[in-house]
Image (cartoon, rainbow, N blue to C red):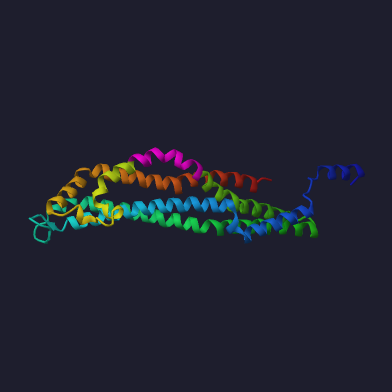
Amino acid sequence: MTQKTRSSARTAEPRRTPLILLILLGVAALAAALLHKDNPLNRSAQEYARSVAVASAGVYVSLRTVNAFLSTAQEVEVGGSLVVSGTAQPFKILEPLDDTIERIASIVFMTMVVTGLLGVAMGPVSAVGAALICAALALWVTDRLIGRQDLVVLLARRLSWYGAFLAVALPLAFLLSALIADQLTAQVWDENNAIVTEITAPITVADTEPDAGFWSVVQTAEDYRDLAWNIYERADELIGSYIAILSVFLFKILVLPLILTGAFFIAIRFFAHRP
């Protein structure tokens, strides 16, 4: 190879990141892995997940209260007083509504569990991502010391990008969701929550007025009948509102974060596999 060719090859060779900078970045990534609990990005994402979990827990309690009321109503015989009987059960017509409420409650419960899991897992997953970045930087440093190996460089580059996805992009997707989800769903939530509150208020009075309790509202069989038929007559509104509220939860904790996470993943994959 002539002197001119060697000179051209050196000129075409990409500039390398200084070794000391790689070491410092590796130390920073290791610190991020060990101190993930103090990472403000992780804390914000976890707080968002917990807020959705708390809200879904409140809706779950409401659903189970209505479910219990409807289940009991099906066993009540209407007479001069409340008498539980298996011989005459005029409120058996409420059974389909009761079953639907129970199914919605089960989905809300699963959403609450998933949300709680995300809140707990966000920090450890971020720590794993930071550890991958640290491992990638360690490979780069090793490569500098032993001489350039294409396979090592390729592995380090992919580890660093996928580590960045776990450490930064994933919690960032939930943080962005926290900033925009409420704005997108506030109207739907307010309208449907008002409908649910209006319909179920008489049977959830024990939650808001412990001293009064349910039986201060339902003192006769006629009161019980009126409440049961009110729910039956407005069943379409009640079910529709509960489904809308469930949709808000799914959008806030699954749909929107998945859309943002998918966008980040596509970008990360592009750079990780870029020649």
The residue located at (38%, 56%) in the rendering is 110
State the predominant SS element of the stretch in magenta.
helix
Q: Position of residue 101 (x, y in %)?
A: 27, 51
Q: Position of residue 5 (x, y in %)?
A: 88, 43
Left or right of 112 on screen, residue 74: left
Question: Is residue 121 shown in magenta?
Answer: no
Question: Is residue 182 shown in magenta?
Answer: yes
Q: Is residue 151 visible?
A: no
> In which quarter of the view is residue 148 placed?
bottom right
Q: Position of residue 86 (x, y in %)?
A: 11, 61
Left or right of 56 on screen, residue 33: right
Q: Across the whole image, how many numbered discs are drawn on residues?
A: 0
Q: Is residue 153 visible?
A: yes
Looking at this view, name the residue that lies furthest to the front.
Answer: 211
The residue located at (45%, 39%) in the rendering is 183
> In which quarter of the view is residue 76 placed?
bottom left
The residue located at (8%, 60%) in the rendering is 87
Q: Position of residue 261 (x, y in %)?
A: 53, 47
Q: Nearer the viewer, residue 205 or 70?
A: 205
Q: Nearer the viewer, residue 228 or 15?
A: 228
Q: Which residues are magenta?
A: 178-191
Q: Nearer the viewer, residue 27 or 82?
A: 82
